[in-house]
Image (spheres, rainbow, N blue to C red):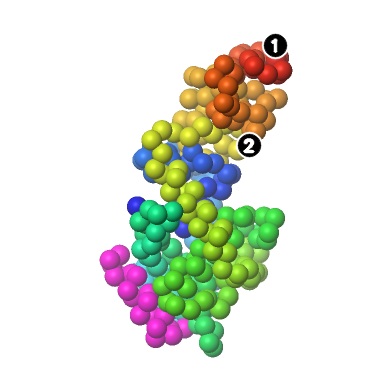
Amino acid sequence: MRVTVSDIVSLYRPTPCDLRIYLREHDFPEAEPSAFDEILRTLGERHEQQHLATLGACEDISAIPAPDRVSRTIEAIQNHLRVIYQGEFALETDVAGIPVIVVGRPDYLIWDTDGYIIRDSKLSRQVDADHHVEITLQFQLYGWLFERTIGERAKRLQVHTGKRDIVDVPCDGGVAAILAELERVLRLKQLGAEPYEPVGWTKCGGCGFNKYCWDKAQESGDVALVAEVDQGLARQPTSSANPRRQMRATRTGVTLCGNQLKKT
């Protein structure tokens, strides 16, 4: 099975959602990108290319045929090329006893005297422990792939932010957290049926599966449609050991059988 760094990002963006991983793995159709999405994509590409232009001559791995990109990336690293653009790693390994190929493509690998800096351009203006956890996980996975492939640690992990700042990401290995996220992605991809994921106006607004999930929630009378019911409470019926507990959304409110919440 194949797991990519993008899968980790998909868990958290636009908002955290397990179902998104399952739907993409099973090729459910997503809505076409909106005009706003296209603007963001264009701005992201421009931001990336503007930063690349400041780094000087580079080895552009994206211009190489796909089957050769991993080997050419490793060769470029071994030759200490100054800037490697869109390098690719593909590591065959086991996660929770499952054979997988983990793939990552950092924007830039930059040689800095005695080691490589791994850097990505992001439109996000603030990246820290309290903002964009997916970016931290993404970079720690890049660092893990680099170390497992090359045999040495990256010198630094860095984000080129939407403010054009260069921000260091903790390069502490984070192996336990990385493996936990990879295992989570694998579990979701291998499920035999869709995992339950409550809908929400803010939560689902920017997702390509918005219509699919809301249509399904409305058809089933999902309690998550009721504004007063939070995400944690909405999840309870699917995890309760009591088979008599049922939750039902109506046009006027919510009824929870087997508990005390009752609104009409």
Viewer-side residue, 78 vs 96: 96
Quadrant of the image occupied by residue 26: top left
SS majority, magenta: helix
Q: Residue at x 51, y 63 (%)?
A: 141
Q: Which residues are magenta?
A: 64-82
Q: Residue at x 39, y 43 (%)?
A: 190
Q: Residue at x 44, y 53 (%)?
A: 96
Q: Position of residue 211 (x, y in %)?
A: 49, 30
Viewer-side residue, 87 vs 188: 188
Viewer-side residue, 65 vs 99: 99
Q: Position of residue 135 (x, y in %)?
A: 58, 59
> In the rendered view, does 16 fall on the left or right side of 189?
right
Q: Is residue 160 visible?
A: no
Q: Earlier in the sequence, mark 1 or mark 2?
A: 2
Q: Residue at x 52, y 53 (%)?
A: 181
Position of the C terminus by quadrant: top right
Amino acid under disc 1: Thr
Q: Would you say residue 69 sits in the magenta stretch?
A: yes
Amino acid under disc 2: Thr
- Label 1 sits on residue: 264
Q: Which secondary structure, mark 1?
A: loop
